[in-house]
Amino acid sequence: MYAKSLHIYDFKCYGKAVLDLQYPSRVGKHVSEMKNVNLILGDNGGGKSSILRALTIAALAPALLESGFVPYRLVRRAKPDAPAAEQCLLKIEAIGTLNESFELSGNRKKPVLLARLETRGRGSLDRLHLESTPDSPVAKLLADDYSPAFFVAGYGATRRVESGEYSESSARRSRGLRYGRIAGLFEDQMTLRPLQLWLPRLRRRNPQQHASVVELLNRVLPPDVRFTGERDEEDEQYMFLSDIPTPFSALSDGYKAFIGWVSDLIGHLCDVAPAELNIDEVPGMVLVDEIDLHLHPQWQRSVVPTLAGAFPHLQFFFTSHSPLVASTVKRENVFITDTATDGTATIKQLEEHVFGRSMEQLLLSAYFGLQSTRPDAFQAEDEALFRQAANGDADAALDFLARLTHAAPLTAPSASKEQGKRKE
């Protein structure tokens, strides 16, 4: 399934929001060349992660009941002097994909997925209220955790790979598998399946698919990292980092964070991929909070196009604070969160182009809204120099001009002032 649009009413920090989304099979107007990517930008606390959570709840609502999902403060809370919402509604207009047959009722021509949540008095826990929500057209499809239909995976900003003892059976007993694939968006303590746990089993069970996993993982890694699928003498998966054999646990946080969630995703795709499909041909939705997490700027410049190309049948939703990430997509791919006058969050798309612009240009644009990319202390020095120059200090004027042209200042502001006093 792909989400054609998302409608939000009184969820988290949003009052009302509507998103017209990019998806792999989209045609017509406003289609991006990279039509399987949706990138959400915005300030901290602006509602980026809330969009990812709204999508997963609306998509998987029937599977979330009794799966370990805890709806904590999801209905919009208001200020003490403002009326609070008692319930929220999430709606996805869906597009069916492989093996997904939607049984539509009434006069509906398009499959619509709904989820309703309501508050429980003064507490922080809300209730996922399906009794008052129309029957989901995909409820039957969700009953089979290993079906390729209706695949959704999500990764929160606190994602990490378990480095100690990890029991896959215990993890699956504590959470339903459908919810387990997106639990990281709601639970800070959620850990990812270690590569060394499931990949050796796959090699014994399906050598051909194992080879596909190795090839696919190498397709999304930077050129200086190579993965062979082999294990070292301590039975740990290792990479070749600049041609040096390196155990996974010895990699940097950036490599571990990225390889951790991508390999977890590939593992879930292996679980559901039918015999007639390659791993990268399984359709579905994947949501990743802070895609640039721990990544060097060089990697940020390529990570989104690389993932979009490696998994062309997946609909991606990324959040980011990086102008380098933003410059790799088109304006049709980008959503910007903001705050309305009543304090609720808003989300919109801009007409301003984003693709290929420099980091400085983007940071000063409406996409990031900075007035300057320089530190506050540097700005204060500039203002001090300008005031000294306006008062007739020639050295301060030269220093100010040098700073405007990015040249080294001839003197510090305080030194210019002292020299001016001595001349007097």
Image (spheres, helix red, strand yellow):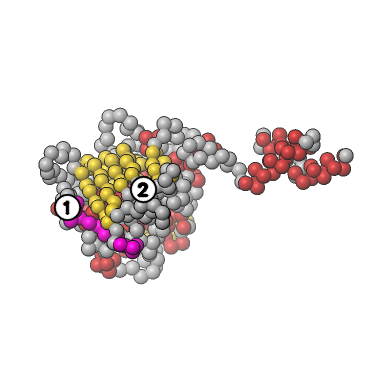
Which secondary structure, mark 1? helix
Residue 122 is one of the magenta-drawn residues: yes
* Main secondary structure found in the magenta portion: loop
Name which residue lies at 17% across and 49% down.
134
The crowd level at tag 1 (other Cα within 10 Å; few <14, some 14-19, many 20+) is: some
Query: Residue at label 2?
Result: 14
Give residue 190's quadrant in the image: bottom left
Q: Is residue 91 magenta?
A: no
Residue 162 location, x and y as percent? 38, 64
Q: Amino acid at mark 2?
A: Tyr
- What residue lies at 50% left-to-right and 46% top-to-bottom? 297
- Residue 184 falls in which quadrant of the image? bottom left
- In the rendered image, the quadrant that contains the N terminus is top left
Q: Which residues are magenta?
A: 121-133
| Picture coordinates of residue 248, whole percent (x, y) | 42, 60
Image x and y of residue 181, in percent: 29, 57
Q: Residues within 10 Å of mark 2 (few under 14, many from 20)?
A: many
- Tell me the mark number nearer the camera, choosing from 1 and 2: 2
Query: Where does the C terminus fall, quadrant-wise?
Result: top right
